[in-house]
Image (tube, helix red, strand yellow):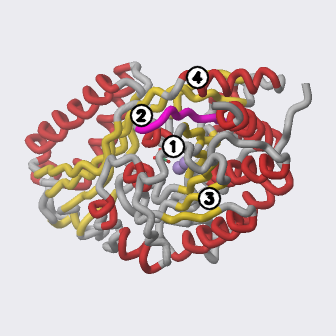
Amino acid sequence: MSHHSINAERLLAHIRELGAIGRDDRGQLTRLAASDTEKLGRDSLVGWIEAAGLDVAVDRIGNIFGIWSNQDNAEQLPLMLGSHIDTVINAGIYDGCYGVLAGLEVIETLKEQGFISERPIVVAAFTNEEGVRYAPDMLGSLVHVGGLAVEAALATLGTDGTTLGSELARIGYAGSVEPGSLKPHAYVELHIEQGPVLEREATTIGAVENLQGISWQRVTIDGVANHAGTTPMAMRCDAGLAAARVGLFLREHILRSNAPSVATIGTMRFEPDAINVIPSRAVFTVDLRDPDEDRLQALESALSDFLRHLEQEEHVNVSVERLARFEPVIFDSAIVEAIEVSASARGLKSRRMTSGAGHDAQMIARIAPAAMIFVPSRDGISHNPREHTNLADLVAGANILLDVVERIAGSR
Ligand code: HGY
Ligand code: MN
Ligand code: MN
C-alpha cells in the first residue's frame, strides 16, 4: 500500500534553520520564553506559517497558531497539532521544535496533495513550555485550557525579575486573541522521546498513552553565616550543608522505594556565596515526578517531613514555595491506537509508553482528546546540545503524524 510522505528536505531545513537561531558567542542554543532570541525564533516560524499560506493568530499569552481552513470546514472544531519552540539553557535543536515544524510540514504536504479536510487543521507553538524563565512550565497551554487566568500568567515574575506580560509586549507577541478561543476537536503532539527506551528497544515509534505527574517547589533554607575556619562543625547552622542533605535524602528515599519516581535539584544558589563563609542561605528547586498520583503525593510528604526534621537537626529554618503541580494524565486511546495502526501499516515497530517529560499535550488533554507520538533520542539524551534523532526517524514520526491527521480530519 503506498503511503503519502512529508517533504523530508523541507522539514529538516526548517529544523536546522530554527536550531541555528538563538545561539550565543559560544555556540550554545538558548531561546528562553519571551527573550530576544526567542523572538527571532518566533519571527521565523510566523514567516514559515505565512509562506505556507496559513492564517496566523497570536493570543494574549503569546501562543502562536497557524490555521488552515476553508469556507466549507471553518465552522468545525479544528484538529490541532503542535508543541513549543522555547528551549532550556544550552539546548538541543529538536525538543519542541520538531513537533511544531512537523505539524507545519504535515499541513503543507496535505495542501500540496489536495487533501480535503473535514475540519480546520491548526499548528500551535505554545508559550513558555519549558518553564525555565517563568514557572510553571507548559504555561501557554495551561492558559489555553483555562487552567490559569491569562492576567495571572502575564503577571508571572521570571527568574530575572521581569514579568511575562511585559516581555511578550516588548518582543511584539502580546497578541489580541482570547486564550482558549481555538478549542480543538483533538490534539496530536509529535516529540522526541528525550529518554532511552525506544533506542534501547530498537523501536521507531512511541504511542504515548500517559504522562507522569510533576511537582516543582522552591526551597529556601536559612542558617547563620559564620567563619569557615573558626566555627566548630557542631556549632554551625550551615544552610549549604542542609541543602546538600536534601539531595542525598531524595536519592536514597527513591532508591529504597523501588518506584519509578525521579527527583532533580536543578538550580541552587548560596548567600553570601563566599569561599570562607558558612552559607547563611540556600535557595534551590526540587522537581519530583511519578506516573502515579498517590506515589507522587507520598514523595512530596516524605520530603516535607524530612525538611521539618532538617530544621531540628541542622538548626536552620526552611520555607517552601510551590512552583508547579500537575497530576498524571491519560491520553486518548483511540488516537493512541491510530498511531499504532499507522506504524504497523508502514512496517514500523511501535510500543506504548509513558512520557517522563511534561508536554503541552498534558494540558490540552483537559479539553480535548489528545495523544503523543515519540521518536527515539540518541543515547536517551535531551536538554543537552548532544540531543539528536536521526533523519529516518524524524521522517517516520512526521509521516505517522500525517497518517493520524488524515484519519481524524479526513472524515467526520
Ligand atoms: O519539564 C519538562 O518536562 C518539560 O521539558 N517542560
Ligand atoms: Mn518539549
Ligand atoms: Mn524540554
Q: Secondary structure at mark 4?
A: helix
Residue 106 placement, left or right of 307: right
Q: Which circle's residue, 1 or 3, is located before the other in the chain?
A: 3
Per the rendered image, the range of residues in magenta is: 367-375
Which residue: 40% across, 37% down?
A: 366
Q: Is residue 302 above or below residue 149?
A: above
Whether the residue under disc 2 has CB within 8 Å of ligand 1: no
Q: CA distance from mark 4 to mark 3?
A: 25 Å
Q: Secondary structure at mark 1?
A: loop
Q: CA distance from mark 2 to mark 4?
A: 29 Å
Residue at the limit of the structure toward the front, as seen here = 72
Which residue: 61% across, 68% down?
A: 41
Identify which amino acid the numbered label 2 is placed on: Val
Instruction: Please say whether residue 241 is visible from this viewpoint.
Output: no
Quadrant of the drawing holding the C terminus: top right
Residue 113 placement, left or right of 212: right
Q: CA distance from mark 4 to mark 1?
A: 16 Å
Residue of label 1: 184
Residue of label 2: 262
Residue of label 4: 334
Q: Residues within 10 Å of mark 3 (few under 14, many from 20)?
A: many
| Residue closest to the eye, 79 or 403 | 79
Quadrant of the drawing holding the N terminus: top right
Q: Is residue 293 above or below residue 29?
A: above
Q: Percent from the top left, x then y, of residue 253?
A: 32, 28
Q: Are marks 4 and 1 in contact (CB under 8 Å)?
A: no
Choose mark 3 or mark 2, whichever is in front: 3
Q: Percent from the top left, x then y, of residue 23?
A: 63, 71
Identify which amino acid the numbered label 4 is placed on: Ala
Q: Percent from the top left, x then y, of residue 56?
A: 60, 64
